[in-house]
Structures are given as structure tokens and as C-alpha cells.
Image: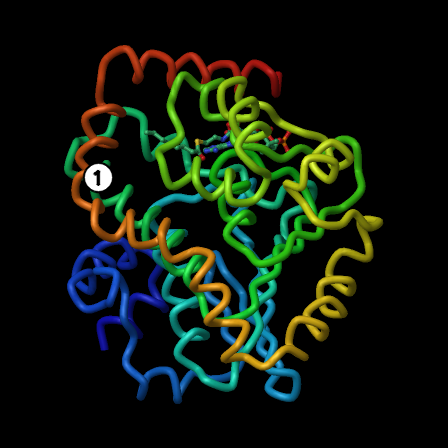
Amino acid sequence: MALRAALRNKCGLSSLLSQLSSCSSHGGVRVSPAFIAQRRNNSSSSAVKVDFDQSTGVAVLHMQSPPVNSLSLDFLTEFCINVEKLEMDKSCRGLIITSSQPKVFSAGLDIMEMYGKSPERCGVFWKAVQEMWLKLYSSNMVTIAAINGSSPAGGCLMSLTCDYRIMADNPRFSIGLNETQLGIVAPFWFKETLVNTVGHRHAEMALELGLLYNPSEALKIGMVDQLVPEDQVLTTAAQTMKKWLAIPDHARQITKSMMRKPTVEKLVSEREADINNFVSFITKDSIQKSLRMYIEMLKKRKG
Ligand code: CO8
């Protein structure tokens, strides 16, 4: 009942995350099979819309949180609930993640969740960020990011968790882990996700300089796998998905797990310490000052 009420009412989602956090294998959100059976087809809640095609076994998750799909606690909670539902539905074999917002895939973590908040709130927020990463990075589904806009920081991380990335070939869009530009440090699991994708040397430069790449540069270093015209991102993702789904699930899933397990296990075993690190880092006066300057810069740039 609590879950259904929360899906209707976005405001209840963050408290729901903490209520449910003891039930999952990763210490996160678990949804009952009965609930999944009831909501098997398409669903639309405020920040996320899921179109599930039973005939292909492929779901498309549209992020639709204006203006820039920033990853707030409410957004992450809703996102995780929807991914969990699909994960537990055995007829769903593939997930395409895309954005309904023009020009932006996701602006990454909601900066306002990290600025001027209590340590307790920061801890709950960080647990939700971990949960998103764990769900996607260890998903049994084939996951494809259809990156139809800019994707800095946490938005880039979300796409890096996928099995394949297709980006719109528009030089105005950018992607990368730009944390150092905000005066903050990407944690080890962000770093390892990037290293596992582009290799150590590119990851080192990208992280130290907080580089944001245009699509051609991102393709060159392997941060994305394919560029296509903006209006073909979703159709190409659907075609690519067919190829991935032609591989027997069990063989692909075991292989994926073999590649990703060390990083996943490391976060699972260090989850509490990672939350404590984040909270003590982000609440420091000097870091809060950096964030304030960055927020002001974002506002000025707009003006
Ligand atoms: N969080 C909250 N609000 C945001 C964010 C964000 N990440 N990004 C943009 N906004 C807001 C803007 O302030 C603006 O608000 P308002 O309308 O009230 O002035 C509104 O969204 C629209 O923004 P823009 O006008 O800039 O929109 P554009 O379409 O021109 O540009 C971009 C979109 C490219 C996404 C641009 O907004 C941008 O570059 N945003 C900043 C992205 C960024 O740097 N994100 C980093 C977040 S940190 C993170 O994800 C990982 C942190 C790891 C922490 C580790 C600590 C230990």
C-alpha cells in the first residue's frame, strides 16, 4: 500500500526509500511480485515514464523531470522503483534509458541536494545515488543509454552503467565526469565505472581535469559507443537492442556479472563507509563554498 501511495504522490517517495531500504539484496528498494504483476505494462509517474513492449520484451524509460532531469532524492527513488519493477518482471529483457527533456539527458546529481542540507539528509540522498548505480550496474537486463542531450557528472555515470551508449551527434552536447570542476571528488565507484569503460589513462585525465567531451571526442575515447543524428537515437537503440537480445540471456548475464562483480562487491561491502565519507566531505565549509560558487556560476551563465 505504501508503495502504491508513494507512486501516486511524488512527495512520499523519499521517505519510502528509507522505509524499504532494509529489504533488498543491496540494502535498497524491493518491490513485491504481486505489485509487479499488477503493474506489468506501461507506467507513468511524474518524473519517469516507462513504455514496456511485451512483444519485444523491451522497456523504454523516459526521464521527464524538467528542466534538466537532475537526480534529486525523489527522482532517484522513483527511478529505482521503476527499474526494480522491470528487473523483477522476467518478461522484460532489455531496458533503454532516454530523456524527454530537450537538449539534456541528465544534468547529474541535483546540486541543491548537496548544498545547505543536514548530514542526515545528505546520507539518505547518497544512499539513493548508490542504489541507482547498483541497480543499473548489476542489472540482468540489457541496458542501453539513448543519450539525446548533454550528460554531465551523475548523468554520465548513469549512462556508463549501461551495456551500450548511443549519443546524438550534436556538437553542442557534452558528456563527462566533471566533478573536479565543482571542487568535489568522484568516489571510487564512479572512477572504476569510467576506468572499466575507457581505460586507466583516459579516465585519469578525464577525472583530474573534470573534462566534458563533445560527442566526437567521447566516441574517440570510448565513453560512448556510437553517434547518430539526433532524431535516430531511439530507433538505433531499439535496433541495437535486438542484436544484444539475440545472445542467450544466461551466457550474457554471467559474462556481465564476471566483468562487473569486483566493482559491485566493493561498493556493497563498503557502502556505509562510502556514505560516511560523502557526508563528511560534502558538509565541509570549503566544499559548501565551492558548491555555492558553482551554483552562482550556473545562474550567471544563464543570464
Ligand atoms: N542540479 C540542480 N539544478 C540544476 C543542475 C543540477 N545538476 N543543472 C542545472 N540546473 C538548473 C540550473 O541552475 C537552471 O536553474 P534555473 O532555471 O532556476 O536558473 C536550470 O536547471 C536550467 O539549467 P541551464 O539553463 O543551465 O540549462 P541548459 O539547457 O542551458 O544546460 C546543462 C543544461 C548542460 C545540464 C547545464 O545546466 C549544466 O551544465 N548543469 C550542471 C551540470 C553539473 O555540473 N552537474 C554536476 C552535478 S554533481 C554530480 O552529478 C556528481 C557528484 C558526485 C559527488 C561526489 C562527492 C564526494
For the N terminus, the quadrant is bottom left
Which of 27/19 is in front? Answer: 27
Question: From what the image shows, is residue 219 above or below residue 217?
Answer: below
Which of 182/289 is in front? Answer: 182
Residue at the disc numbered 1: 275
Residue at the (47%, 39%) spot, across then down:
154
Q: Position of residue 192 (x, y in %)?
A: 43, 40
Q: Position of residue 191 (x, y in %)?
A: 44, 35
Question: From what the image shows, is residue 47 above or below residue 243?
Answer: above
Q: Is residue 272 left or right of residue 226?
A: left
Q: Is residue 189 left or right of residue 108?
A: left
Q: Position of residue 153 (x, y in %)?
A: 50, 34
- As helix, strand or loop, the secondary structure at mark 1 comes to helix
Question: From what the image shows, is residue 81 above or below residue 147?
Answer: below
Q: Is residue 156 left or right of residue 224?
A: left
| Quadrant in the rendering for residue 25 | bottom left
Residue at the (51%, 25%) spot, across then down:
204
Q: Position of residue 253 (x, y in %)?
A: 49, 72
For the C terminus, the quadrant is top right
Q: How many marks?
A: 1
| Quadrant in the rendering for residue 143 | bottom right
Residue at the (57%, 27%) spot, across then down:
201
Residue at the (61%, 60%) spot, across then down:
144
Residues packed near mark 1 inside 10 Å, few (<14), some (14 to 19) or many (20 plus):
some
Which of 53/191 is in front? Answer: 191
Question: From what the image shows, is residue 171 above or below residue 261?
Answer: above
| Quadrant in the rendering for residue 55 | bottom right
Mark 1 within 8 Å of ligand 1, using the beta carbon: no
